[in-house]
Amino acid sequence: MLNSELKNGVLVYSFEKEEKFNAPVAENVKNEMAKHFEKPGTKMVFNLNGIKYIDSSGFGTLLTLHKRARTNEGVFRICNVESQVMELFRLLQLHNIFDIFNSEEECLKSF
């Protein structure tokens, strides 16, 4: 379901063979990723490559991760958002909340 990799001190998460970030997967994603923000200063990237749909549970998980990161002096960034999903971010005005990058490489360079 989720892949994780440490790259230059940044935790990079991505989905394995998922096209939807919705209620059936959101709770597991939140539990897996949020625990890392218990450690102050954690840097994390969520690579959404291949995700074609996000529902309210998925967006709720992203907001929870963003809040946990900020609460504990961490950083949470998103990359590789498909155009139809980016439209949802814009519609919900979430593109103003999250740091969103076109590529993982660009995102990692931003740290």
Image: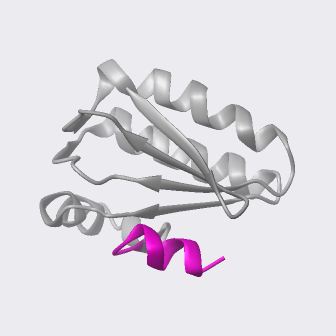
For the residue pair 2 and 23, the one nearer the viewer reads as 2
The quadrant in which residue 23 appears is top left
Judge from the rendering whether residue 79 lies leftward or rightward of residue 69; answer left or right: left
| Image quadrant containing the C terminus | bottom right
x, y percent for residue 11: 63, 51
Q: Which residue appears farthest toward the right when viewing the image? A: 40
x, y percent for residue 3: 46, 36
Query: Can you say whether 31 is above or below 5 in the image?
Result: above
Judge from the rendering whether residue 68 lies leftward or rightward of residue 28; answer left or right: right
Judge from the rendering whether residue 89 lies leftward or rightward of residue 71; answer left or right: left
For the residue pair 58 and 32, the one nearer the viewer reads as 32
Judge from the rendering whether residue 106 lies leftward or rightward of residue 52; answer left or right: right
Query: Can you say whether 61 is above or below 41 in the image?
Result: above
The residue at the point 58 percent across, 28 percent down is 32
x, y percent for residue 96: 44, 74
Range shown magenta: 101-111
The question of residue 53 being in magenta is answered with no
The question of residue 102 being in magenta is answered with yes
Query: Can you say whether 55 is above or below 79 in the image?
Result: above
| Image quadrant containing the N terminus | top left
Label count reads: 0
x, y percent for residue 90: 27, 69
The quadrant in which residue 25 appears is top left
For the residue pair 64 and 108, the one nearer the viewer reads as 108
Colour setup of the view = one colour
The residue at the point 57 percent across, 46 percent down is 5
The residue at the point 54 percent across, 31 percent down is 30
